[in-house]
Amino acid sequence: MNNIKRINLKRICVLLFVVLSVSIFNSCKQKVQPVVKVKSKFYYTCSMHPQIHEDHPGNCPICGMKLIKVELTGSGNSATKKITLTASQIQLAGITVDTVRKENTGGEKLLTGTVVTDESRAEEISARIAGRIQRLFVRSVGEKITMGQAVYSIYSEDLLSAEKEYLLARQQQKVLNNPDVDYDALISTAEHKLLLWGLNAAQIRNLSSLSRTSATATIYSKINGTVSDIAVHEGDYVTEGMTILKTQALNSLWIEAQLYASESGNYKENDMVNVSFPDLNGQVIKGKIEFINPELSDDSKVVLIRIAIPNTQGLIRPGMLAYIAIDNGKQNNVAVPASSILATGKGNKVWVKNSDGSFSERKINTGAGNQGYVQVVSGISPGEVVVTGGAYMLESELVFKNGG
């Protein structure tokens, strides 16, 4: 009996060992499932400090600016190669673009110049009649004025007499109606005098309908421009022809520079030049040589050269420093603006704006160039659009998306 119990006990132990071995073997066969970390499809960063990455909106902890939202496009490798920004983000980051095309990449003579106002577009508003300035409606230099805008009001005894003369002629026409008197000519003469002395047609019609004079008259601008000087104050007495204020048209400016007399023969009026501005991140625009002074400066024996440039966006201001690149030899090649090229340890690259509005980096091989444009040997084609300003913002985004 005891032998039977011992045999059963051994069988139970063997069975337990087999079950335990099978369990251990099955557990070893099961694969451990990795924990998938879901990455956000966007983040918030600062246009001035792209190293800031937040997962929620707010303000930059460094400068306090409102954070901008950056969308991550695509998946896998494609998500790390493209940057997509909204229109407001592009504006905040200061991103500008230009089209790849043939440009002169030959040698250039570099001149340093200064932005000045285009004196040929300067105008002024002067007093049409003697009197006292009662009120100035334009009070500060730099203020923009438009045609039809009130400039100042004036009290003038002569203007008051002319208004009475005009009303009297109209009254006599109604009351007397003498056929021997040409009342229309009298009224026309009085009206012409009022126009000459600064009133406009609407003011004269109002004078006629009210049939009474006013102690002061408001003078309205007949020009557009930016105020460069105000010559009077409220309460001043002015005489006929005295300057009230001066204006400049800042949508077109001059750049003045100097050439040595021996170099002046190499250039002529209407030649096109490239102009860049260090205060505008090296932005390059086209200018035209408008004037080369035929006389030498008495002191330094140099020649004054003047370049006309457009300023449609109003970013260029008088007093700015400018670099003028004048061609010494034409070499037209497919080129990109020099400001678009990013030099790296592995070569040069640019950021390209894609047809879907996103941005991606592109390696290029470059050739000879100048301050304005650099020849592209390979890597990009004419008609493509490259980033000329704000590329470092995109570069920072790419580095952070790739994890450093």
Image (cartoon, rainbow, N blue to C red):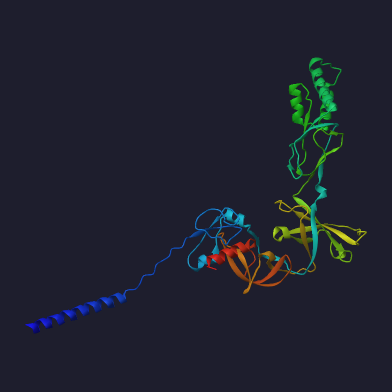
| Residue 234 seen in render | yes
286 over 210 or under it: above or below: below
Q: Quadrant of the N terminus?
A: bottom left
Count of numbered badges drawn on the protein: 0
User: Horizontal placement of 383 versus 237: left or right?
Assistant: left
Residue lying farthest top?
176
Q: Nearer the viewer, residue 317 or 193?
A: 317
Residue lying farthest left?
1
Query: Which residue is pictured at 58% across the width and 57% down the height?
Result: 46
x and y, in percent, of residue 183 in the image: 83, 21
Q: Nearer the viewer, residue 13 or 199?
A: 13
x and y, in percent, of residue 10 in the image: 15, 82
Query: Which residue is pictured at 60% across the width and 68% down the height?
Result: 362
Q: Quadrant of the C terminus?
A: bottom right
215 over 340 or under it: above or below: above
138 over 32 or under it: above or below: above
Residue lying farthest bottom?
3
Which of the 4 image quadrants contains residue 320? bottom right
| Residue 184 seen in render | no
Query: Which residue is pictured at 82% across the width and 17% down the height?
Result: 172
x and y, in percent, of residue 264 in the image: 87, 63
Residue lying farthest right?
298
